[in-house]
Image: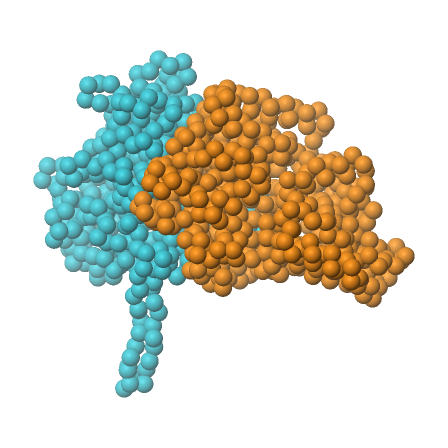
Amino acid sequence: MAAAALASAQSFTPINPPPCDFSDQFYADNGIVTGQLVQRFGDNNGTTRLTGPPATGSQHNYVADSNCSVTDPTRRNFRILATTGGNSDDNNSPFTCADLGPSASPGCVNQPSVPETLEYISILAFLHSEAAFETSYTRNVGSINGGLDGVQQNPGENISIVNSANPRGIRMEDVIGHFEAYAHIHQKLSNGTFALNPCAADMVSSLAPATPCFSVADQNGVSDVATPNLAMNWRFATNRNAMDGSDGNCINNTDQNCKHKTQSDSPYGYFCDDLLGAWIITYFWFTKPANTTDSVCAPVFANMAAQNGKDLDGYPNILTAHELNDELEANGCGAEGQEAVDGTDGGAVWLICPAIPDPRNGAIATDAFLDHVATGSFLDTFISSNFTCLKNNGKFCSESAPEQ
Amino acid sequence: MQYSRGKQGVPKMTTIKDGNSSRRDFLKLAAGAAAFGPYFLFPERARATQQTLKIAKWAHFLPEYDQWFVNALAKDWGQKNDTNVTVDIIPVEQIRDRAFAEVKAGKGHDLFIFPWPSAEFCRHVIDHGEIYQAVASRVGAIQQLAHRSTFDFQTKKYFGFTDFWIPSPVHFFQDYWGQIGMPLGPGHYGSLLGGGKQIRDKFGAPCGLAFSPTLEGNVTLHTILYAFRALILDENGNVAFNKNVFAKVALKYLQDLYQQSGTPEQLTWGSAGNVRAMLAHKTSCSINGISLLRTAEKESPETAKKMRLQPPLIGRNGMGITALPHVTNCSAIWSFAQNQEGAKKFAGDLVDSSRAGYEQSKGCNLPVYPKTLPDFVLRIEKDPTADPPYKYAEIQDALHWTPNLGVPGVTTPAYMEIFNSSVVPRMVARVLKGEQSAEDAAAAGAAEMQRIADKWKQIGA
């Protein structure tokens, strides 16, 4: 469907383009071997993952759209319909219900005391091993040989990857390593018991028995982190730091205002350095059954469930880093880890899933659909209601509420 | 701030000259033994009116740096400041005892330079705040790593002055890790475990992280504990260790790492033992200052060629990419120092030689004040010695992933006593040797930390 058609279907003037897959060239320019992209939307002449998770039934995850590369030359002509909703782990998203006082906007009513923050992303592909990172690559851009009647000469500039590092000497794996996306795979087995560790020797937590375990490997061509395998929604550490520190993040260690911080903020900004919008996946899991009577974990689960609702396995939803690290993991009720970077664990180590910078004003197209884990109570409501508002009105619910 | 230049207050012309004998002595010692702690004595021909400045300094991992420090930096400074400068180079493993001995005697050197924050000696040093203030006009405000490493929140004074530091990246052999599908290194602690096991099983090369009660062992183990959120002290200086499960989980991880990929030598290595194992290509990886790679470039270029750096491993429990500094160079001036003014000036003037220090240390010493080395990133992208030349670019963001010793709080006397008395390596060794369970070792370690913290609270520091 063309963008013009989309525009006519919406009641506002689209400004932000909807998401599309990156071009092969852009992947390569950013240090990714396109042949190593696993289950990339649009591969095999537009058949790979056209249907199937996250789409359901005959629903399509993407659609051919010739406007993609016109609007943005770094994109190829597959527009992504599957829009994954999740929470911003570091509370750093601008789309938040931070103000819960009397003046709270209508979209934030009944939100938890820890503000829930939103991100919408497009899961374009998965990476399973370090083989996905280019070791050597060069492309010359901007060269001119003989323009202006042979007078104009310009050797151009090389976009290069040398020994896995870009011209700034930075490896893409290092950049991505600063951005963690948190996935929680189903732990409840078909027989009703709970697996308390992943089936990967290098991820096993000492806090729980190694078996039975839950799979972290792709099964039958479906990613281990495909939506049906998840028990709760993603959380993302998007780190929207500005390169120049204009948002108050400490990028300059000589800044007097930063000397009391334990460390500077990330040297990398998500939208400035991680141009593919990739994350390393941090898998997290519960080390006690959801129905545990453990004197420590049972109250922890109950308190968080009362606040956040429960996931599909009956565990409490985790919305923030504080909840995961300080409440769940610190009490021995949860653990986390990443898959082996050589791919031997069989699932996704990294994701190519750029966050939509600003989902308003057309970035959520009328034919887009929300990919999220269907959990209980408000979590769904917050993500899904805002998705609907964005799709229909080009605004968050809190922004469009007065007109509703 | 004004520094006096001796009792007469009159700058003197050059008076420092190398007597033949002392020059020869220096060269003889410097030629091969700086790492073993030679005693360097510098110009002796002092006039009656001339000031003397006695410096004790930890022995740098690269002996040539100390040669420059003694032969050029201290000598030139002495000439410019009409001061007879002596420099004693002391092995890292002895420097703490030497400092205690001087405190006990109430005399010794004027300036004592530690490879870590001198918090333990906070009651016996001057306030170094005026040095930071003095250099601010030249190189900018104090930087956070220095501030948090040397500021005493109890007294609101600085117990030391920091001019450079050395980060702790991961060193790994690409030939080993490449053959198991991890050519870019382990990346995170899970792959360090899995990959380390594969390499030891296939090639007989164990993982070479130092676990012994040495500087390397302490930095490595404190880094791992912190990366697992197993905090030693909280931000208020209270013991946080073993107050949750993170300590036990970290110890069990270390147990797995040791059993599946390690070697008993990790527990017995002396100072720089992990470095020598890597230089011999006997281990697959280590955590160390880049002096390891620099030494390899000098002694075994072929080995160095196979060695790569990577930023610290991604931590668990929300800690991200982080590693404690291998060195926090800290100048401390005793309150009983004979020449406090000279020592202040010398310490402050160190920032003016940050660039030269960086070069003479082969890039190991990263200036605390970025303005003293504005082309740092350009330099490490095209290092003249490295093969490939951009190898060191991996540390370009080191200041972002390096917190101070004592994090999440500032560096405190209690933390530094825990660090320097090797509470952590001894605790870990008990687990790895099977003498104690992770639970019991964590409890015992926490009790030892508590005793140290209580002692310092009683002292009031």
Q: Is residue A161 left or right of residue B104?
A: left
| Residue A340 x/y as whole percent | 32, 39
Q: Is residue B173 left or right of residue B225?
A: left
Q: Is residue A157 above or below residue B180?
A: below
| Residue B127 x/y as whole percent | 74, 43
Which residue: 51% across, 29% down? B428
Name the residue nearer the viewer: A243 or B260. B260
Q: Colour of chain A?
A: cyan
Name the residue nearer the viewer: A394 or A299. A299
Q: Is residue B122 left or right of residue A16?
A: right
Q: Is residue A235 above or below residue A329?
A: below
- The quadrant in which residue B50 appears is bottom right
Which residue: 29% across, 66% down? A139
| Residue B338 x/y as whole percent | 83, 46
| Residue A263 x/y as whole percent | 52, 43
Name the residue nearer the viewer: B202 or A250. B202
Name the residue nearer the viewer: B312 or B19. B19
Which residue: 43% across, 35% down? B262
Q: Colour of chain B?
A: orange
Q: Is residue B189 above or below residue B453?
A: below
Viewport quadrant of the C terminus of chain A = top left
- The quadrant in which residue B354 appears is bottom right
In this view of the protein, can residue A205 be seen by the observer? yes
Residue extending farthest to the left is: A58
